[in-house]
Image (cartoon, rainbow, N blue to C red):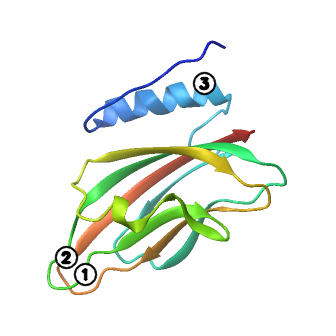
Amino acid sequence: MAQQTLIWEGTFTTDQRDALNEMLTEIYAVTSVAGAAGSATAAYPKTTSGAQTLLAAATVDRRVIISVQVTTVFADGDGAQPTFEIGQTGETDKFAATTLFTGAAAGATFSLAGTLTANTALLVTATAATGTTSTGALAVTAIASAA
């Protein structure tokens, strides 16, 4: 397959996100972005805490494309907004440090890519929001293929 470059500035609409997921599914030859081997989608509300496994470990290095959509604006309110980092076992901020999402607007999207090291899981590690009016939430989709 010829190399293709995707450049996007701004936010994705739901239809555009679905179209991108279809293209990625075709490129990586998985049958479904949500649920096929090597791919997963999950929502992370402001109450999420600790390391959450998005993709289980595999015995080989894998290329991974991670699409993150902010579903609720990140704001401190009367406490502190939640924090999220995306990485792998032993390197929890390999793909995204907490600062990437600090103050992020609802609808903002982030595309991350890299190599998920053999025998490590893809993790979304969170610290829950504090206070009653603090906000912030993500939806994360990851597609992995053998490197």
Residue type pointed to by label 3: Glu
Q: Residues within 10 Å of mark 1 (few under 14, many from 20)?
A: some
Tag shown at residue 54: none
Residue type pointed to by label 2: Asp
Calculate the distance from the C-alpha at mark 2 to the C-alpha at mark 3: 39 Å
Q: Are marks 2 and 1 in contact (CB under 8 Å)?
A: yes
Circle 3 sits on which residue? 26
Judge whether residue 59 can be spotted in this image. Answer: yes
Q: Upstream in the sequence, badge 2 or badge 3?
A: 3
Q: Residues within 10 Å of mark 2 (few under 14, many from 20)?
A: some
Write the residue at 34% across / 73% down: 46
Write the residue at 21% across / 77% down: 134
Left or right: 96 in relation to 58: left
At numbered mark 3, what does the secondary structure look like: helix, strand or loop?
A: helix
Circle 1 sits on which residue? 80
At numbered mark 1, what does the secondary structure look like: helix, strand or loop?
A: loop
Write the residue at 37% across / 68% down: 45
